[in-house]
Image (cartoon, grey):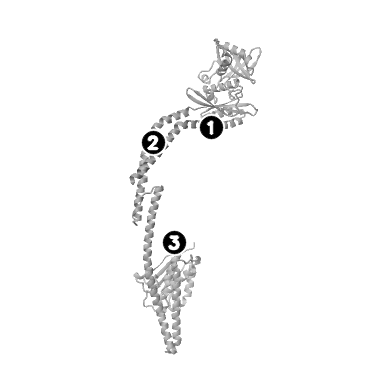
Amino acid sequence: MKFGIVLKLFLLTTTLCLLITGTIYIGQTIFFKQYYENQKVNDLKSSIKSFEKQYLKSNGNVQSIQQLEQDFYRTHNTWITTLDQNGNIISSNDYYAEIKISDAKNSNQFVTIPLYHLLKGEDVYKDTPTIIIGEEVDLYTIEKNNIIIPFYLYLAQNDSYLVNQFIWTNLDKEFQMDHHKEFNLQDKIALTIKYQSQYHSNFQISQSKGIIQNVRFPDQNDVSSIIYSNSLFMERISEFQTDLLFNEENHFTTIKTLDYEQNGIKYKLFIDPVKEKNGNISYIFSMASLQPVDEAAQMVNDYFIYLIAFVLLLTILASFYYSIKIARPLLKINNSTRKIAGLDFSERIEYYSKDEIGDLSQNINLLSDTLHSHITQLQQDIEKEKQLENTRKEFISSVSHELKTPLSIMKSCISILRDGVASHKKDYYFEAMEKEVDKMDRLIIDMLELAKYESGTYRMKMESFYLDKVIEHICHELHLEIEKKQLTIHKELNSIKVLANQHLIEQVITNYITNAIRYTPLNEHIYISTIVENEQVKVCVENKGSHIPVDQLEKVWERFYRGDTSRQRSEGSTGLGLAISKNILNLHGVKCGVMNTSDGVLFYFYLNMNL
C-alpha cells in the first residue's frame, strides 16, 4: 500500500515538473524573443507619445527640446530627436556654417547650412575640421519648399569637399544609372544639375560660391553631443531626409516603426509625425537597438541546457521528498483511524504542517478527543444517573420520614379528639395539628423551590442593588428571633453595589443568618461582614458555637442534612435551606463555602460587584 502511494505520487510529480520545464523551454526559445521585442516596441511607442506632448508644450524652445531628448535617452537608452518638415534637426543650433554668397546672382546673401549631414560628429570630437572663417567655398544645394538643403561643400583653400552621402547616392541613382563612363565627382555634379532640370521639377539643384562667415561645432559636453556622436543614428536621419526629398508619396500620418540591421545588430526606427501649432508637420525620430534583446535571448538559450539538467535533478529529489511527505502521514492517518474504529483513542497523529493533510491530522485528533470525551462523559453520566437514582431513593426516603412524623402526630391528635379524651386540652391539640400542617407546607414549598433551581431551566433577572441595605433589612426582619435567644449581632458592612437577583440573594442571606441563629447558643455573638476581593464581594456569616465535623463540612449543602442530631423538630427547619442557597449561588455562577473557626462556624459566598 505504501509503495503504491509513493510511486504514484512520485510519477505524477515528476511528470508535472517535466511538463512545466518543457513548456517553459519551448516558450523561451520560440516566443520569448518576439514577446520581449514587441513589449519593448509598445513601451517605446507610449514613451514617444509622452515625449510628443512635452515637445508641443516647449513651444519650439531649443534648450527645452534638447533637455527632453537627453532625459529620454537616459531613461530609455534610446536616441531621439525632432526634425522639421524637410528632415532637418530642429535643435541643431550648435552645428552649422554661415556662408555669404558672392556670385552675381545671389550677391551678399547669407545662407546658414547644417553641417551634421556633411561632417560626422565623431570626427569633430576627435579633431576639429579645417573649416576656416573667410575661406572660399563652392556650395551645391537642393531647394525644396523654400528650404535649402546642402549636399556638397567644396573647400577651395584645402582642396577638400564634404558630401551628404545619402542625397548624393540618390541623385546618382536618378541621373547616372545608364552611364557607364567613369566621371569624377565634380563632373557627376555638373551632369546631375543638367539632368535635374529635365526630369525633376519638384526640387532644384543649384551651385553657389561664397565665403565662410561663421562656423560652429558642438562641444562634446553639450546636450546635443549624444545625437551627433552616434554616426549610425545621424545616417538614418540623413536617409529619412533623403526619402522626404525624393519620394513624394512618403507621407506619415501616424507613428511608424521600421526595421534596420547593420553588422548583425537589429534596430527599430520610430517616426512620429507631429502637427505644429502653425500647421506644419514635424517629426519625432527615434532609434532603439535590439542587441540587448538578442543577447539576452541567446544567453538564455545557452544557459537553459544547464538549467534543464539542474531542474531534472531537483525535480527528482523534490518529487521523492514530497511524495514521502504526503504518503507517510496518510499511512499514519490510516493506522490511527483503524484504532479509533476499535475504540482505542490513545494513538495521536504528530503531524502539524499547515496544509490539508495537517488539517486532516488535527481534525482526526480532534475527532478522537471528542469521541473519547463524549464516551467518558457518557460513562460519567451513567454513573451520575446511578447516583441520582440513589439520591432519589434517599430523597424519597427522607421525605417519607419527614412527612411521617407530622402525619403521625396529626393522626394521634385526631384520635384523642375523636375519643373525647382530655377534652379540656382540645385547643392544645388543634394548635399542635396546625403547627404540623405549617411544617408540611414549608417542606413542600422548599421541595418545589429546590426542584425549580435544579431543573436547569430557571432564568434569573439580574439587577443592581446595595448589599448592605439588604443585610440590614433582613436583620431587622429577624430581630424577634435574635432577641429571643439574646444574641448580639456584629456587622461590618461596606456600601457596595452588586449585580444579582435581589430576591434570591435575600433568600440566601436569610437562610445563612437563620441557620446561624438556630445553632448559636444563648447570649452569644454572630458576626456579619462584607469584604471586597478582586472585583467581588465576599459575604461572611460567622456564629459562635460547636464545630461541624470536618468529614461533614461538604455534606451541610445536601438535602435534609442536620449536623446537630439533638436538635428538635420544633425548631422548624426543613433541612433544605442550605441546599436551596447553594443552587441559587450556582445559578449566579459564584462560589460558596463553610469552614470552622477557632470558636464557631463561618459560612460565606461571593457576589459580583456592579462596576
The quarter of the picture where residue 517 lies is bottom left
Quick one: label 3 or label 2, which is nearer the N terminus? Answer: 2
Judge whether 540 appears above or below 78 on screen: below
Residue under label 1:
42
Judge whether 414 appears above or below 230 on screen: below
From the image, state whether disc 2 or disc 1 is nearer to you: 2
From the image, state whether disc 3 or disc 2 is nearer to you: 2
Judge whether 33 appears above or below 184 on screen: below
Amino acid beneath label 1: Asn
The local secondary structure at tag 3 comes to loop
Give me the C-alpha separation between circle 3 and circle 1.
73 Å
Residue 100 locus on image (x, y percent): 62, 15
Q: Residue at x 39, y 57 (%)?
A: 370
Give me the C-alpha separation between circle 2 and circle 1.
33 Å
Residue 563 locus on image (x, y percent): 37, 74
Residues under numbered marks 2 and 1 in contact, where contact means CB atoms less than 8 Å apart: no
Give me the C-alpha separation between circle 3 and circle 2.
65 Å
Residues under numbered marks 3 and 1 in contact, where contact means CB atoms less than 8 Å apart: no
Quick one: label 3 or label 1, which is nearer the N terminus? Answer: 1
Q: Residues within 10 Å of mark 1 (few under 14, many from 20)?
A: few
